[in-house]
């Protein structure tokens, strides 16, 4: 997984749903890596780094979902 494109503007040709699917897949991969490192009992800094990347992806998901919802003025 290339972390250089995290947080960058995605290709405009990719739909929001497609990007959300990509993010979910990336987060699942990160979960597996975090779990493997945790079971090995080491690399606390790497685990923390992976968790930060996962959080950034969650933030991106939230922004995409929010941008797809219409603004409703009550």
Image: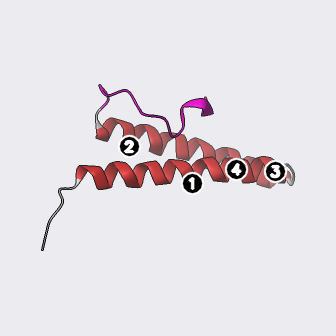
Q: Mark 4 points at which residue?
A: 34
Give the CA distance from mark 2 to mark 4. 21 Å
Q: Which of 23 and 25 is in front in this view?
A: 23
Q: Say few, some or many: other residues with alpha carbon within 10 Å of mark 2 (under 14 / 14 to 19 / 20 or more).
A: some
Compared across the picture, whether 25 is left or right of 73 comes to right
Residue 65 versus residue 6 in the image, above or below: below
Name the one closer to the observer, 23 or 10: 10
Of residue 10 and residue 22, the one placed in the foreground of this image is 10
Disc 1/disc 3 C-alpha distance (Å): 15 Å
Circle 1 is placed at which residue position? 55
**Vertical comparison of 70 with 24: above or below:** below
The residue to which callout 3 is attached is: 45
* Distance from the alpha carbon under mark 2 to that under mark 1: 14 Å
The dominant secondary structure in magenta is loop
In the shown orientation, is residue 60 left or right of residue 51?
Answer: left
Instruction: From the image, state whether disc 3 or disc 4 is nearer to you.
Output: 3
Question: Which residue was labeled with disc 2?
Answer: 20
Image height check: is 50 above or below 74? above
Magenta extent = 1-14
């Amino acid at each position: 997984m290339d972390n250089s494109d995290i947080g960058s503007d995605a290709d405009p040709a990719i739909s929001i749903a497609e990007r959300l699917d990509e993010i979910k897949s990336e987060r699942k991969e990160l979960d597996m890596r975090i779990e493997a490192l945790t079971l090995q009992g080491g690399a606390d800094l790497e685990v923390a780094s992976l968790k930060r990347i996962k959080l950034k992806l969650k933030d991106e998901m939230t922004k995409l979902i929010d941008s797809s919802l219409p603004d409703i003025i009550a």
